[in-house]
Amino acid sequence: MTLFDNYWIHFAIFVIIILTFVMGMVMGFIYIERRGLGRFQIRLGPNRVGPFGVLQPVADAIKVLIKEDIIPAKGDKWVFWLAPVVAFVPVLMIFAVVPFQSGALLADLNIGILYVVAVSSLAAVGVFMAGWSSNNKYSLIGAMRDVAQLLSYEIPLVLSIVGVVLIAGSLSMTKIVEAQSIPFILLQPLGFLIFFVGALAEINRTPFDLVEADSEIVAGFHIEYSGMKFAMFYLVEYCEALAMSAIITTLFLGGWKGPLLPPFLWFLIKVVGVFFLFFWIRSTIPRLRIDQVMAFAWKCLLPLALLNLLITAIQVLVLGEALPWVIVPVNLAIMAVLVVLWSKFFKLGGGRVAV
Amino acid sequence: MAIKTEPFVINIGPQHPSTHGVFRMRTTLDGEVVVDMEPVFGYLHRGIEKLAEGRTYTQNIPFTDRLDYLASMSNNLAYVLAVEKLAGVPVPQRAEYLRVIMAELQRIASHLIGVGAFLNDCGAFMTPILYMIREREKILDLFEMVCGQRLTYNYMRVGGVSQDIPEEFLPALAKFVKVMPGFIDEYDQLLAENEIVLARAKGVGILPKELAINISASGPVLRASGVQWDIRKADPYSVYDRFEFDIPTGSVGDCYDRYRVRIQEMRQSVRIIKQAMEQLPSGEVLTEVPLRLRPPEGEAYGHIEAPKGELGFYLVSDNSETPYRFHIRASCLINLTALCDMMIGWKVADAIITFGSIDICMGEVDR
């Protein structure tokens, strides 16, 4: 295995693997989501291109490639051009530290999860650039919403990660997976819930899809985009979903671990499972309003995340890093109590402003 | 340093996913908050009122189909009622019952789209409306059986209905009436207590009782504000005085109440259809009326409780083949007049759902 030990060869191989994996999975996700939504909405979904419509994403890709590329006359041309790239690159960069199976990752950073948090927030810059440079009021509202939402949800998101890091005792993604003899979703049920909701908001999915709220601001930040630039944003959306699924899998679902099947397959199954949850939610519930979204982050998720962190810290301090099975029902009970209590406290509604 | 901000004007519509047609809201926003709103309509104006003055009374029936195209049967009914009043044409009993059945089916179909579109505006990604379209499809199939059309029916005639129902209609209707309450329960299970629907719609876009009466709102919009006013009870037309049904009302007049009133009205409609099916007499369905009807000089106002509110036709005859004046009291347009008062101070998202909860059809607003 001297070949793989070479830094550059390892790098080259994994770049290719990641690109193939991401593109392949995004195609798969688009197909799964469209067919799945069809089933949820008692219709068929795309079923004409190829057997069962599997080639629909390919047909879509060809379609957007040959579409006219329109740049708004009064838009900021350079920023407009740059925005999809700026949005796309950080999302792709997340996969550098996602372990597909033991040792199979581009760079086993010892601060892996910190890197993920840092890089994933960068996509907001691209979105804001797009919203600003389009010179369109709808897109500007969308971009403003995106920045506000992302900044707010980053905090509970990171705090819920800290709980995981406390138990695992490491920031490295590989170490976190290896520490999960019990999947962290059981040890950290509340943390998982907060992370999941935060992830939904971070990737702008229902009920937090205010950024592109089609019934209010039409398409939000990418309203003026067409052709391949639009496809880039579409790609970003699904890459983010894929990245978040992969991170949730790694942090809470035990990564590649699982019986019988090969580790990589387990990883895939879990990723698709999480993504299935994403679009199940999308097809089921309506959208929140912007002030409710913000209130939910600051008044509901943040205190819960802090409490979760406190409880985890106490448990780790008292019981040591290897938490036993006994703690699982305790934590589940704590989660149930806290969530129910908080939902009694916290009511959304109202919101009229005197003008 | 304080950042200088200023309100900006944004045109919501005429091409916008949730303006239900070509309606434009010239909205002034302060950030996300609606400061001012000016409705602009007329993009779909076809001059139906003027066109109708050049055509005979029978020729005008298809025009009424194209007013509120989601409730063509109701429009037909309101128009023929006005003409019958004007010309004094008797209507056979069987036709009266058929008209009631059709009008109530139409109410369910229209409310399904109204509620579905409202939830779509709330941001539910197409799922509720597609479930509701499933049931609407069944109603459209029933309509197709009786008149061969699925959108613009042209079924009612002056003096009755164009043709009797086919044999397979009543069993199909019985089946529909049997399953429909179950479907309404299904919507309630999914949506009535949905935390996000509550958070979004409760207390939002309130239309106070006094204002609702002052703008002469009608239909579910008025009833949601707590006014028990339904023309089927207040001024019974056709054979509505023979059926038992309740008038559901709301309490606050917010978007949620309007949504609830529509759901409950569907249940009442099913009740009425059931009774009408039981009482349905046999016999003729159409009184012979001269094709070129010349009503005596005079005027008449025929109004019904259409799905979206009071729909009235005011006709003036000068004893010629064509109406001298043909005026439509369009409930959608009148319900819209309070829109600005309802949405000022709320966020853009609330403005959209408030507009959606009024449930308008641009075909009737602009006519």
Image: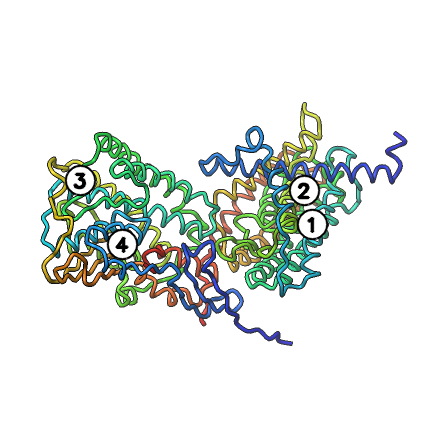
Q: Are marks 3 and 2 on the same chain?
A: no
Q: Are marks 3 and 1 on the same chain?
A: no
Q: Chain of mark 3?
A: B
As measured in the structure, the alpha-carbon distance from the residue carrying label 1 to the one carrying label 2 is 17 Å
Residues B86 and B317: in front is B317
Q: Which residue position is annotated with label 4?
A: B249
Disc 1 + disc 2, Cβ < 8 Å: no
The residue drawn where x is 71% and y is 56% is A82
The residue drawn where x is 20% and y is 50% is B58
Disc 4 + disc 2, Cβ < 8 Å: no
Badge 3: residue crowd in 10 Å (few <14, some 14–19, many ≥20): many
Give the answer, above or below, for where B186 lies relative to B50: above
> What quarter of the picture does the N terminus of chain A occupy?
top right
Name the image colouring: rainbow
Q: Which mark is residue A88?
A: 1
Q: Chain of mark 1?
A: A
Give how far across and how far down residue A330 sits, in percent. Answer: 58, 39
Single out the mark in the foreground, 3 or 4.
3
